[in-house]
Image (tube, rainbow, N blue to C red):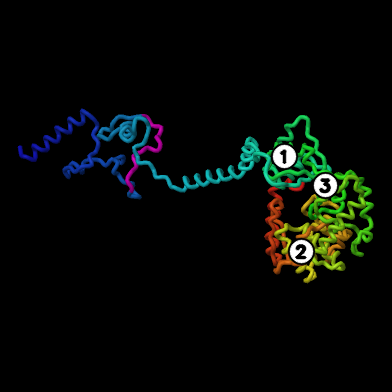
Amino acid sequence: MTRRELREAEQRRLAEQQDVSEPAYPSAGPTDDAFDAAAPTDPYSPTTAYPDHGQEFDPSPTHWLDEPEEAAAPHGRPSRAERRAATAYDDGHSNAAPRRRRPWGCLIGLLIVAALGVGAYVFLQGPITSIIERFQPAADYEGTGTGEVLFQIHDGDTGSDIATNLESEGVTASYDAFYDLLLEQVPEPEFHPGVYRLAERMSASAALAALEDPATKLENTVLITEGTWARDALAEASAVLQIPIEELQAAASNPQALGLPAEATSVEGFLFPATYTFDPGVTADQVVQTMVAESLAAYDAAGVAPEDRYRVATIASLIEREGLPQDFAKVSRVIQNRLDQGMLLQFDSTVHYGTGDNSVVTTTDAERADAGNPYNTYVHAGLPPGPIGNPGAEAIQAALNPADGTWLYFVTVNPDTGETVFTSTIEEHEAAAEQFYQWLEEHPDYGQ
């Protein structure tokens, strides 16, 4: 027997043993040409290519046909069950490499989560802050304070009004510190109109004790603040001095008898803002005469000629009502520039004076269009008929000495701080006005 015959016999013997022990899988390795030619091509082999794509076959089953399991084929090809076992784990997981996910899905998901987080923060920030502040103690000073503050309680002031004014004048640290303390008092405290000698940076309890102490109340002392309307100044004097309001109004009814300009139709603009202390038993005539005399002295001290008093008083009253002291000279320049160019002043403060309502900061379309209001500077050119309040010394000086500038407009963008923006063009003014409207939206209770 030749060497070739021996080799072929040995291969037949080995093949017979393999058929008995287990099904034979086609070999991917090299064999004799004759053996390779005789072996059938297995379409389920992992290296079998798709006929039209040339891609390697993915052995992971995507679905199974509802066919019965079968034994190994006579020619040695594995059964369907054996192929399934060879290509899948017993736990049902595929041997195939996992498909790579594209990053866009994750990125979009992260963006959605981030957007929801930002939206939730914006939506819940206000309520959460409000809840936190509700459980935090109100800001408060310690002790009885320093310096001196003449604090006025007006006739009709409520506890809330007093709490607001104490904070704004630097007496207490916050509205809540004083008002919350009031709510705890049993019985409720009674406050009387008048002027009280307090201090700066007082604790809420110290301020309350001082307002209830008769020794801190300045008897027969009337405080008239800058810009106060004449009607309110007389009402304040009536409440403090216990003089009937009708008597004070009668004493002020004849401006010329008090030495006021011929154009004056009332004492408006000539009840000088100051702190007045009167002797017991003072009369209504004495009260009015004292205030008017102080006003005329202030105009004289500023160098205002008698014939110019009424015009200066009118301009100064506009300045006092429209701006803060640091802006008085700029407001004066705006008034002068608009008058020089024949423009309407368009001041809300003049409309308010004509309607008799000084509790608001804005005007309605109907109010601005009302030609029946002689003080409506939205429809009537020039200055209003007369003063719209009682100006102080700084406003009088500003009326006489306007700042240099080309401003034609101004708007207070934050009524709480008094921040005011001055502009020279309508476009700039409208942009500034938007800041004010935004502030009003953020403070819906303002002026209520």
Query: Is residue 367 in sight in this rendering?
Result: no
Q: Quadrant of residue 163?
A: top right
Q: Nearer the viewer, residue 87 or 65?
A: 87
The amino acid beneath tag 2 is: Gln
What's the distance in space between the residues labelled 2 and 1, CA to CA?
35 Å
Name the N-terminal-most of marks 3 and 2.
Answer: 3
Name the N-terminal-most of marks 2 and 1.
Answer: 1
**Span shown in magenta:** 55-68
Q: Nearer the viewer, residue 210 or 413?
A: 210
Label 2 crowding class (10 Å Cα cut-off): few <14, some 14-19, many 20+?
Answer: some
Q: Quadrant of residue 176?
A: top right
The x, y position of residue 7, in whole percent, is 10, 38
The x, y position of residue 16, in whole percent, is 17, 31
The x, y position of residue 220, in whole percent, is 85, 45
Label placed on residue 221: 3
Taking 424 as reference, is 182 above or below it?
A: above
Which residue is pictured at 34% across the width and 30% down the height?
A: 90
Which residue is pictured at 14% across the width and 32% down the height?
A: 13
Q: Which residue is mark 1?
A: 207
Left or right of 170 on screen, residue 4: left
> In the orientation shown, which residue stands out farthest toward the left?
1
Magenta stretch containing residue 230, yes or no?
Answer: no
The amino acid beneath tag 1 is: Ala
Chief SS of the magenta region = loop
Query: Is residue 303 in sight in this rendering?
Result: yes
Magenta stretch containing residue 66, yes or no?
Answer: yes
What's the distance in space between the residues labelled 3 and 2, CA to CA?
27 Å
Kindly state the secondary structure of the residue where label 1 is placed.
helix
Q: Which residue is mark 2?
A: 397
Label 3 crowding class (10 Å Cα cut-off): few <14, some 14-19, many 20+?
Answer: some
